[in-house]
Image: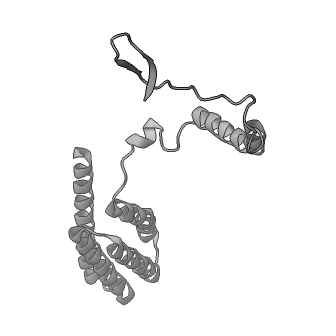
Amino acid sequence: MSVTGVSSAGSVAITAPMLVPPTLPAEAPARRGPPLAARLAPLWPLLLVFVVAAVFGALLGMPGADSRQAAKPVRSADELALARLDGVRFRLRDELALASTADEQADVAERLAMAYGHAADDLSSPELESAAQRASAAYVSLEGAARAADEDAYESARGRVEVAESKIASGLSRINLQRGRK
């Protein structure tokens, strides 16, 4: 409490304490380390790499950002397996048609049976898998008939091959229809 004076009525006047402003230092505080520019100097090459990468990224675009690639649907496992089978079976069926001896026919029929068997292993659709297995079995019977030189058995096996291949074709067209709806 501070007393400033006594009034004529005899009362004491009390005034609030005065706040003293803090004293400012006469000089700036000492730096704790090197200046910011000196600390960032070793990082300039890294900054340059980021800037160059950003420029190339902007110029070239993001991978996969092409609208043609984004619009291309992904093929199913069945479609991939059937595409691999088609690559083999069309060529082998041509070879079978051009085979001049029963042994050549049997060899090609054996390779076709193996191709359908491998495709059946890769297919996920039960319908397509069973059709490929039936085609493989039909080609095995075609091979046996060719090796035995039995024309009746050969014609019977050829009919089973045609039925099995038509089942695969209808299964593939069903997949393509489902794909078209998506």
Where residue 72 sits in the image (x, y, percent)?
Answer: 39, 44
Where residue 57 sits in the image (x, y, percent)?
Answer: 59, 38
Q: Quadrant of the N terminus?
A: top left
Indicate the quadrant where residue 42 lies.
top right
Q: Nearer the viewer, residue 11 or 171?
A: 11
Task: Identify the colour scheme used.
Answer: one colour
Residue found 78% across the figure and 40% down from its top: 38
Residue at the farthest bottom position = 148
Q: Can the viewer see residue 157?
A: yes
Q: Is residue 156 left or right of residue 4?
A: left
Q: Nearer the viewer, residue 115 or 126?
A: 126
Where residue 8 sits in the image (x, y, percent)?
Answer: 37, 10
Q: Can the viewer see residue 159?
A: no
Residue at the farthest top position = 8
Q: Nearer the viewer, residue 65 or 52?
A: 52
84 over 60 or under it: above or below: below
Residue found 60% across the figure and 32% down from its top: 59
Indicate the quadrant where residue 7 lies.
top left
Residue found 64% across the figure and 28% down from its top: 23
Q: Nearer the viewer, residue 11 or 135?
A: 11
9 over 159 or under it: above or below: above
* Count of numbered circles in the view: 0
Where residue 62 sits in the image (x, y, percent)?
Answer: 52, 40
53 over 15 or under it: above or below: below
Residue found 22% across the figure and 45% down from its top: 181
